[in-house]
Image (cartoon, rainbow, N blue to C red):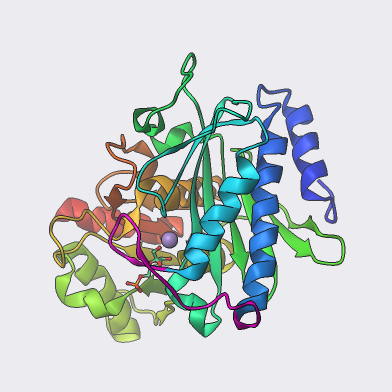
Amino acid sequence: MQIGTTLNQFLLEEQRHLGGVHHDLPALVNDVVVACKSLSHALSQGALAGMLGSADSENVQGETQKKLDVISNDIMIATAERGGYLAAMASEEMDEIYPIPVQYPKGKYLLLFDPLDGSSNIDVNISVGTIFSILRCPAGVMIPTAEDFMQPGTQQVCAGYALYGPSTLLVLTTGHGVNCFTLDKSLGEFVLTQTNLRVPEDTREFAINASNSRFWEKPVKRYIDECLAGKDGPRKENFNMRWVASMVAEVHRILNRGGIFMYPRDSKDPTKAGRLRLMYEANPMSFIIEQAGGVCSTGREPIMSIQPIELHQRVAVILGSKNEVERVVAYHAEG
Ligand code: F6P
Ligand code: MN
């Protein structure tokens, strides 16, 4: 498709071209994207609109909510609930699922989202994002429950993220490659700026929160030690390191120039399988990265093959350039 095509046109043409069953998908994605545009505007106002700081509340995972976590969640709900394309939503910021209220028509999709990923970065004006995943509502379900969301990542119909950085970007897959759109603020439209993104198979750049190193498992420690040893070590090459602490920003960097991102399982809190959430962080990012030729694993199994058992389940995440992720997976197999 031509660079400069608007997101709406792109989605309509893609669905027409595929002749598929997802006639409502362009309109649903458009609703999600309207929320992202609105949030992009709110974020750009920052302190001018009193948007920064804490909301004096906690989410279900016990994390302090920022004002913008709450605002962004409200914006997404208000924008996506009335279109008639959804049966229910679920979000990082809500304990329970959100069924579409009775006054609105009900649709055949389920929307999961992290309204403001990397929100610890908000108050210091570093990039943040919105991550979303779209599933089908199981056939015949009139009133969805959390159980209806328990579908592995392989069942996703669409996944995407908005990255609020120097420019606002939207990266999207419907299972036919990955494309990137840039928000043209004068038009109020996302416009196609990169087609068919591919993650380079090799990389010499890793991203991990090294302050957790004393809690890492052996295979992760081995991999990072080898990277750090550089030219003098077994890899015989120097590696670079980056850590933004916004998953959206790390994934976007990896999509564009390769890299490996890890938030692995560790012994810091043995009750948690990892830091990141499976349903609205790891799965949508895995769908995007794998559609771009990258690999996503927990170290032990492909992320998208995991059968979820709860909405806010956490998972170990190792994703990015194929050859490096496969190396870490091999180290896990060796024990
Ligand atoms: O949503 C979780 C998240 O904010 C990710 O965006 C990011 O990758 C990670 O947590 C940062 O973790 P830490 O605070 O340990 O650096
Ligand atoms: Mn997040």
- Visible residue check, residue 145: yes
Residue 107: % across, % down: 60, 26
Q: Residue furthest top?
A: 140
Taking the image in four quarters, ligand 2 sits in the one at bottom left
Q: Residue at x 21, y 76 (%)?
A: 213
Residue sticking out furthest to the front: 103
Q: Is residue 209 left or right of residue 203?
A: left
Q: Nearer the viewer, residue 137 or 72?
A: 72
Looking at the rendering, in which quadrant would you find the N terminus? Answer: top right
Tell me the residue at 35%/58% (across/down).
59
Q: Does the magenta segment cover residue 64?
A: yes
Q: Position of residue 154 (x, y in %)?
A: 44, 35
The residue depicted at 61 percent of the width and 47 percent of the height is 78
> Quadrant of residue 302 in the image?
top left
Is 200 drawn above or below residue 91 in the view shown? below
Which of the 4 image quarters holds residue 63? Answer: bottom left
Q: Is residue 25 left or right of residue 122?
A: right
Quadrant of the snapshot with the C terminus: bottom left
| Res 275 quadrant in image | bottom left
On the image, the x and y values in percent for residue 187 come to 87, 61
Q: Is residue 40 above or below residue 243?
A: above
Q: Is residue 71 above or below residue 33?
A: below
Q: Visible in this render: residue 196?
A: no
Q: Nearer the viewer, residue 187 or 232?
A: 187
Count the numbered circles shown.
Answer: 0
Magenta stretch in the rendered image: 47-65
